[in-house]
Amino acid sequence: MAGGIRDKVAILGMGCTKFGERWDVSGEDLIVESFTECMEDAGIDRKDIQACWLGSNMPQISVGSSALPLSLTLHTPFLPVTRVENMCATGTEAFRGACYAVASGAYDICLALGVEKLKDTGYGGLPNLNVGGSLISIGANATPPGQFAQLASAYAAKYNVPMKTLKEAIAHVSWKSHENGSMNPRAHLRRKVSMEQIINAPLIAYPLGLFDCCGVSDGSAAAIVTTPEIAKSIKRNQDLVKVKALQIAVSSGEEAFYTEWDGAHFMTAARAAKAAYEEAGIKNPREEVSMMEVHDCFSITELVTMEDLQISPRGKAWEDALNGFFDLKGGGVPCQVDGGLKCFGHPIGASGLRMLFEMYSQLLGRWPEERQVPNPRFGLTHNLGGTPATNVCSVAIVGL
């Protein structure tokens, strides 16, 4: 019977660019930037890599629609390169391919790299996407803010939470991420904002205001993965960050076509999280998970995700948010410790690997005291792609 990949794969090295409006560089430049840091961290030569995975969700805009941009840019002679895309979970999908290749024994050392170069379009949001396919009628609220804002209305109605209170809770979610992002030199948005500014900001889609929505960025992140045995032989005096679980769940339309979904959570996230905890051997996520990076495309998305991940009880995530349970300082399970999508930024193909870069760096204690989680053991990442009604969700757990 299949047993998963727990402790069969170790992260040998990682790299991540600064995210933001990188007008001065191309997508290929971003690939080189993250790859160079990743290789220096891994302590290996280019010739040691045996296979590569490139994640790019909008390749026609950023780097091209084949695997060639990575091969040509990095001069990887005749190596197998696979380009993958899975909406906003694209970066984690590249990581999943590399990890499974190592765990299977097909290769010893693999590269996963994600990149997106979106700001050159001159458009403030994401370029147009054909979301959902021809069988789904999107309707009037086809914008991402419009779709995700409906989570808030459904959540408030289901749990009888006054909208004023819920808006304060999601404002704290955004405030906390801005506080964390302000300390991160690689983050896109580094300016602190007050709770008053967030609550009184212009509405984008009720009840979401301007500061409840993440932006679009340019950026790249990369990982080298191998077996624990090889990693230990290369890094004899360093702790190993191992992959404890890597799970994905993809909607087959239940949310959109049937009436069982209440619109107040993500069915895929709940299923992927359950499978990931079983694979990692985690019995009590609220007590065992040290820190998280989740898909906070909108503040309400992060809030309801806390319940899907079994960190908060159903209907109580808003209380945890207001009580500071997810804050970096004094929180029980710090979330978005690098600023999250909200402030670090969201170049789609790179975001999943950026989340893993933060967990990896935190586990190795590499950050200044002001933004370092003390004594972390498990780091969790959560990537969501698509719409609340039909989506894909990846959950990864890494640990020492």
Image (cartoon, rainbow, N blue to C red):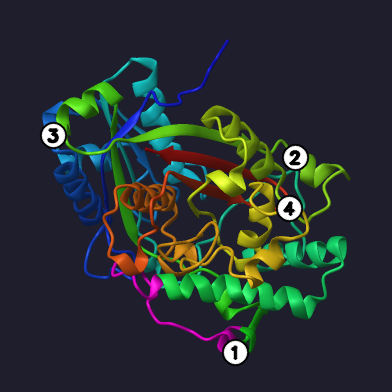
Q: Of tags 3 and 2, which is closer to the observer?
A: 3
Q: Where is residue 283 in the image (x, y as percent from the top left)?
A: 62, 35
| Residue sitting farthest toward the top | 1
Magenta-span inclusion, residue 379: no
How far separated are the C-alphas under marks 4 and 3?
44 Å
Lower position in the chain sequence, tag 4 or tag 3: 3
Badge 3 amino acid: Ile
Badge 2 amino acid: Gly
Q: Residues within 10 Å of mark 4 (few under 14, many from 20)?
A: some
Location of residue 78 (image quadrant): top left
User: Which residue occupies the foreground of this view, 331 or 300?
Assistant: 331
How far separated are the C-alphas under marks 4 and 1?
28 Å
Location of residue 159 (image quadrant): bottom right
Q: Can residue 165 be seen in this view?
A: yes
Q: In which quarter of the image is the N terminus?
A: top right
Residue carrying label 3: 44
User: Which residue occupies the foreground of this view, 49 or 198?
Assistant: 198
Badge 1 amino acid: Glu
Lower position in the chain sequence, tag 4 or tag 1: 1
Residue carrying label 4: 313
Magenta segment boundaries in residue numbering: 181-198
Lower position in the chain sequence, tag 1 or tag 3: 3
Q: Position of residue 354 (x, y in %)?
A: 38, 52
Residue carrying label 2: 253
